[in-house]
Amino acid sequence: MEIQNLKTPFGEFLSGKYEKSFAYKTIKDRLPVIITSIIDNISQCKDSIITKYGSNCSEELKQVIGQLSELKSEMMTNKPLKFISSSENGKKDISKWNECIKNQQFKNENLSTWYNSVWLFSECYMYRRVAHIFLSTTTLLTYDYFEKQKHDNFTTSLETISVLANYTMNVLNESESNLIDNQKNCFTNLLKSTLWGNKCDLSLSQGSAVKIEDMIDETKTLDKNILIDHSDLIWTRLNHFRADKKGTTIDIVLDNAGYELFTDFCIAAFLIENNFAKKIRFYVKSIPWFVSDVTERDLFWTIDTMKNSNHKNLMKLGHRCSKYLEDNKWTVEIESFWTEPYDFSQMKVESLPLYNKLSEAILIIFKGDLNYRKLMGDINWDYETDLKTALRGFQPTNIVTLRTVKADLIVGVPHKKVNELFSKQENWMETGQYGLIHSYFVDHNL
């Protein structure tokens, strides 16, 4: 299919075939750079990789680099999406990916290429193909090719992390004696900190660490950039659940490791200590994903790093997080669905056990842009579309989406406001400058 010199029309899937879309720029520029950064990192760290994984991996590293280069070439020349072979170890989702490639071909009435497929599918497919390359080896099955960038993001943000650790520990130590108004202020600060922590997206910055300003001091000045702010509504509903003693489980579907994950820990600790939840379930990715997405190993590395910190309150908060895990107040959940080729409206059919599991929670907090796109189905909805319509039947329980806007789709915002933003900055949807605290509560009578 020819590339069209258009923005994505309303009602159409986001796709690289629209030249004036962020999808086109992503496939043309960002994704090849990410593959190049993996190759460069392997080349630079080859000796340490061989030391850790054994001399037998030397030859496989050469093969991996060659296969990554081939993948990059396929993308840059807009080749048809290849079926994933069954050569890898341990993953059971290959047939699902291949079936979806067939379905895309049927819808397009021709071979699905990188640009004419749905952007969400093409982009996720790239990360799955990268994982496939490593999972097809015998020595590099557990190698996380994004790990260094994620660790660097945490360590370069330590100054801000330390400030937020001080604030959070003060809040947690005062939880029992806090007046309700002060509790609300603390909740709002932590909620907005975890919203703006979502700026730390290494797939957007092409793998470079991002320096984040002190979010607690910044929250008031950043409020004008929150296009939908349901903080008060969320606070009211949480208190209703607490009063009714329904506060059992809150699910957090994580996005980025590093600074953002730390902000997620802060609000999760607040929710536990103030009896809004008896349990927090953190959902992580089962494989390295979108550069900075959290894996189980990232989560435990972060807590261990906090526990070993020289910063007093960061160390204390690390030990508290570790105790939550020991006491089963926090759990780490690994579900393959998050890295399968589906948007969330398909979960009930493709992963009913997960849908039912999410239904047990009083609230799901979806973090970040990728989760937002999967909630929306990567459809370019009219901007004023209400969230319930865009969810297309996905409503296992009450939903909150925290997202800094880094892709060109959005719902629930008046045309007047959108036009104002476009008049100031043509690419405002790509910058992460604006945020959403957007909720949908299943029972509107509460």
Image: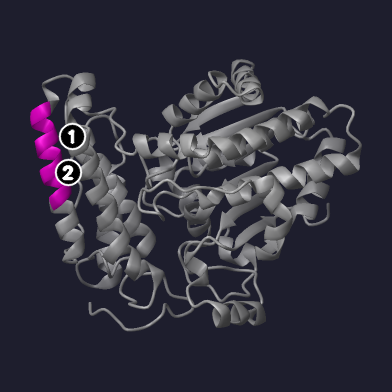
The image shows residue 274 at horizontal and vertical percentages of: 79, 31
The picture quadrant where one finds residue 272 is top right
Mark 1 and mark 2 lie on one chain; the one further toward the N terminus is 2
The picture quadrant where one finds residue 132 is top left
Amino acid type at circle 2 is Ser
User: Mark 1–mark 2 contact, CB under 8 Å?
Assistant: yes
Q: Nearer the viewer, residue 190 or 250?
A: 190
Say the numbered circle drawn on residue 136.
Answer: 1
Q: Which residues are magenta?
A: 58-69
Q: Is residue 439 above or below residue 411?
A: above
The image shows residue 415 at horizontal and vertical percentages of: 63, 80
Q: Is residue 61 magenta?
A: yes
Crowd rating for badge 1 (residues with CA inside 10 Å; few <14, some 14–19, many 20+) = some
Q: Which residue is mark 2?
A: 85
Q: Residue at x 22, y 28 (%)?
A: 140
Amino acid type at circle 1 is Ser
Q: Residue at x 36, y 48 (%)?
A: 207
Say the numbered circle drawn on residue 285.
Answer: none
